[in-house]
Structure formats: C-alpha cells, structure tokens
Image: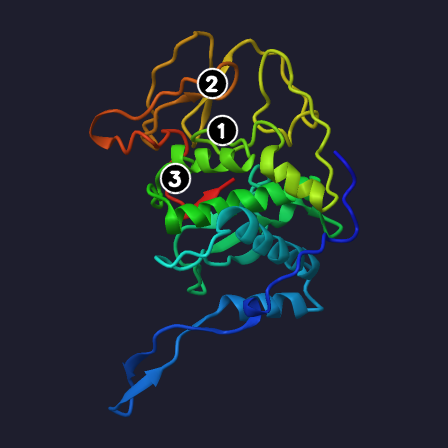
Amino acid sequence: MPEVQNAAPSARAHPALFERRKVSPRREQSPFGHAALIEQHDPQPVIRQHAEEASDWAYREQAAFLYRWAVVFKDRLLDPVLLTDRRRMPDPVISFERMNVKVLAAYTLIRNPQGLLYEITLNAAHIVDGQWSYGQWGELETLLHEQVHLWQQNFGEHPVKPGRAYHNREFVDKCESLGLHPLLGVGCHIKPADGIFELLMREHGIERPQWQEEEGAKPLDWWSSGKERRGSSTLSKWSCGCQNVRVGTKEFHAQCLNCGNVFVRLDGNAAEQPRRTGPAAESPLESAHLISSSPRARH
C-alpha cells in the first residue's frame, strides 16, 4: 500500500456548487394566521462551505478532499451528461462518525437526524493522524462506492429500501462498469479497482496499491489482504448478515431465525450464492446476504 500523499489532488469545483440552489417556493401557514411564502434551498453547498472553512474541525481537510472528489466522480463517472428529462445527480453531505472497525463507510438511505438527504458517512476509526489508513486510493474507492448508492437511489431501476439487501445486482453492475469490484450481497471489494477508476487515479498521480490474489481463496476484501493472519481452518465460512458459521460440508442450506436471511458462503467458491425463497423473496436482482434494520447501506 503506497504512502498517503500529503497534498490532496486538485479537482476544480464549479462555482455553482457554492451557490444556494432555489427550488419552487411553497406557502406555509404562519402562527399569525396568514400564509407566508417560504423559500426552499438546497442546503448542501452551504454545509460544504462550512465544513471546508471550519478551521477548528479535526476532519476539515478530509472533508474538503472528499467533497472535491465527489464532484469529480459525479462529473466524470456518474452523471457526466446533462440530460433534459431529469435533474442532475444530487451532491452528497459528507460526515464522519466512529463505527464498527469492520465498516469503512455508510450511505444513509433516509433523512439523517438533521433532516438532510444524501448523507455519506466515513468511519472515523479509519482516520489516523488526519489521513485515511488505507491510503488515498482506498479512500476514493470507498467514496465512489457510497456515491453509487446515491446514484442508485435517485436514478436506478432497482433502488433498495431500509432493511433490504443493499448491494444488489444493479449496484454491483454499476460498480463494475466504473472499475470497482464489490461482492454481490456483501459489498466488500475483492480486489483493487481498475478500469476507468484506475485511469482517473493515474490522471491525478495516485498509484494503484500493490496487491496479489491469494491462492485457494479470496480475502473478504482487498484491504484486509496481508493485514490479518489467516486461520488454518478447513471449514467453509457462511454468513446471514448478522452472524457467521463454519461448516465442513460443501453445501449448506440454512436460514437464520434471527434475521430471516439465507446463509451464503463467504470464502472459497462464492460465485453461486443462494437467494431468499418463498413469501419473503424480493426481486431476483437482490442478494439474500446483507439485510438489516439499519437505514444505512454499510460498506
């Protein structure tokens, strides 16, 4: 993994990103009995500007770096063509929160506690000395992953709902088209990105991490490759999303009584993954692995 660069890559944000975006005004009954005209604005540009100017905030530099790249990803990869039949893809609201160390980031599917939409939350547990612990390449893979959630929820044909499988076939296919390699139903990246993502990184002088696929089994995600000591167990690992089990048989058909999900295999040949069947089955595009009551799509 290359060292993190001190200077964030330059990505010029359009001046309009800092302007207050007006939408159609609405009338609201005032406490004095008459209707008052209420101007509605997109709060994202103001929030972004505040984050980038908050000199006493520990995440100021990280926020500025991520906001700049969010614009690059939007303009170059996710919504590069101005269409007349729909609005442009919304810009994210970026936040930081300490979460389970196994989580890199999360996209909030509903409004956050402040009533804001399109929130992407980076796990502050992975920020060490002001820098992302997996380097800029890993951080930008994570950001683009979360922006694909934002894209899918606004323009996808199969957006997900809170409590359902967050990394469905549409999500994975979109990521693959951009060079990311998330595991269906799980979301972890099984190898560093390539394709147009790699070309964009090269354009900004960010090198692809050194990585070699391990023989016999893929790691759960490429970030953990070489960082965790692999056990010697010959049992296969299966997960329902809320708990893991290891079994000694090639086939394992079980449904968790806690979350209701079918167990899927995480190691070895995980290409054929079972899906939910019966009355609880969702769209065949959705994997049965990661179903949670959380309103966040975690990565």
Image quarter (top left, top right, bottom left or bottom right) of the N terminus: top right
Q: Are marks 1 and 2 in contact (CB under 8 Å)?
A: yes
Give coordinates of residue 82: x percent, y percent: 45, 57
Q: Helix or strand or loop: what does disc 1 sit on?
A: loop
Which x, y percent locates residue 99?
A: 56, 46
Tell me the amino acid under the disc marked 2. Ala
**Mark 2 neighbour class, 10 Å CA radius: few under 14, some 14 to 19, many 20 or more:** some
Looking at the rendering, which quadrant does residue 180 occupy?
top right
Q: Circle 2 is placed at which residue position? A: 270
Nearest-to-viewer mark from 1 and 3: 1
The Cα–Cα distance between marks 2 and 3, rounded to whole angstroms, is 21 Å
Provide the secondary structure element on which disc 3 rests: loop
Q: Quadrant of residue 289?
A: top left
Residue 210: % across, % down: 73, 28
Residue that appears at 73% across and 42% down: 206
- Residue hosting label 1: 183
Query: Percent position (x, y) of residue 272?
Result: 41, 17
Residue at 76 percent across and 50 percent down: it is 129
Mark closest to the chain's N terminus, 2 or 3: 2
